[in-house]
Amino acid sequence: MAAVTALSLTACSPSDGEEADQPLPTSASDFAPATTCKAPSSARVRIEGGTFIMGSDVVYAEEGPERQTTVGGFWIDPHEVTNRQFAEFVEATGYKSVAEKPVDPAQFGVPVEQIPPFMLEPGSAVFTPPERPSRNYGDWWEYVPGANWQKPYGPDGPDAQPSQPVVHLAWDDMRAFAEWKGGRIPTEAEWEYAASGGAEKYTEQPDPRLANSWQGVFPVVNEGSDGFKGIAPVGCFKPNAYGLYDMVGNVWEVTADYFRPGHDPADRDNPRGPSENAAYDPLNPGFASRVMKGGSYLCAPNYCQRYRPESRQGRDAGLGASNVGFRLAYDSAAPE
């Protein structure tokens, strides 16, 4: 770990006044970065079709079985959709995200008087570090009224930074942006193929020059030896062999496929995942979750070994979170 800590990020520079030895985060706002990075190009990247081994039989059962999978060619964004890009969409259309709208009590499935009043206010799920070690995710996730893509740490926290990935979006928000941009949400197979970059599979935590993950004991000790204790602006880490940034770590990325634990071994040619009726998420039963990929800055070896292209979990389509974003895929090159 000492050798890892000594590594620096070639594309990042600490802002004035930032100290190397900072106190441990005690609130959601403590994860706001104080680092700037050179912005990468936003030009679409062509991914030629091909065949690869999708999935993993090594770490989590829901990632298997491994099977040979073929995908056709497509284009994909080199980085996650940023706050700047989403703000352009909002300015052009007047769009209001799900987290900014009143909550429909009917989605809870219980009488309205049983619902805590704050849960009916517009808001989103924000990572808030607990006071003591825990392995219960409910101890560090908090529904915060007023949290949304513009105020990612809640109404009293700092504003969203233009160069950071946009978060706190629901599936309908991502789809609306994709339609406006002339793109689409990539399938799980497309995303994993692009994320792998033709490299060998791995299980160890990535070198901090390559991905933004959690160094230390999650969820209470975050050493930040990769330069960040929270979300990083896009372009702060080295791209993969296809020129794609942050395909693992930083923020989870939502894909178009519905989630069900495990892969269908027979679904090998441009797979699209299960149908909505066949979808099942053990952590969110009763709702059809989407697959999210690649892990986030909250992934650490002692709890969440998700910093790999094969990693996958279900994502509630109706609720955003402070560590979940997306990028777009396209069926054609950008217009001249």
Image (spheres, rainbow, N blue to C red):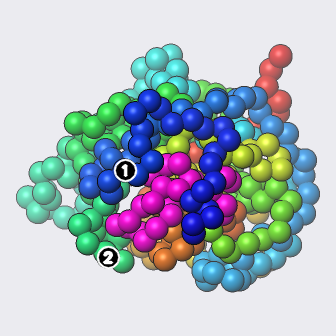
Say the numbered circle drawn on residue 60. Answer: none
Residue highlighted by disc 2: 134
Residue 128 in the image: state x and y as whole percent: 30, 56
Q: Is residue 291 visible?
A: no
Count neighbours of disc 1 (C-alpha within 10 A) and say few if under 14, some if 14 to 19, many if 20 or more: few
The numbered mark, 2 or 1, whose residue comes first in the sequence reads 1
Placement of 286 over or under 290, stated as above or below: below
Residue 333 in the image: state x and y as whole percent: 83, 30
Q: State which quarter of the image contains the N terminus.
A: bottom right
Quarter of image, res 193:
bottom right
Placement of 99 over or under 61, stated as above or below: above
Q: Determine whether the residue tagged by mark 1 lies in a helix, strand or loop.
A: loop
Residue 27 in the image: state x and y as whole percent: 27, 52
Q: Residue at x 68, y 74 (%)?
A: 203
The three-letter amino acid code for the residue at tag 2 is Ser
Q: Is residue 75 left or right of residue 228?
A: right
Residue 117 in the image: state x and y as whole percent: 12, 51
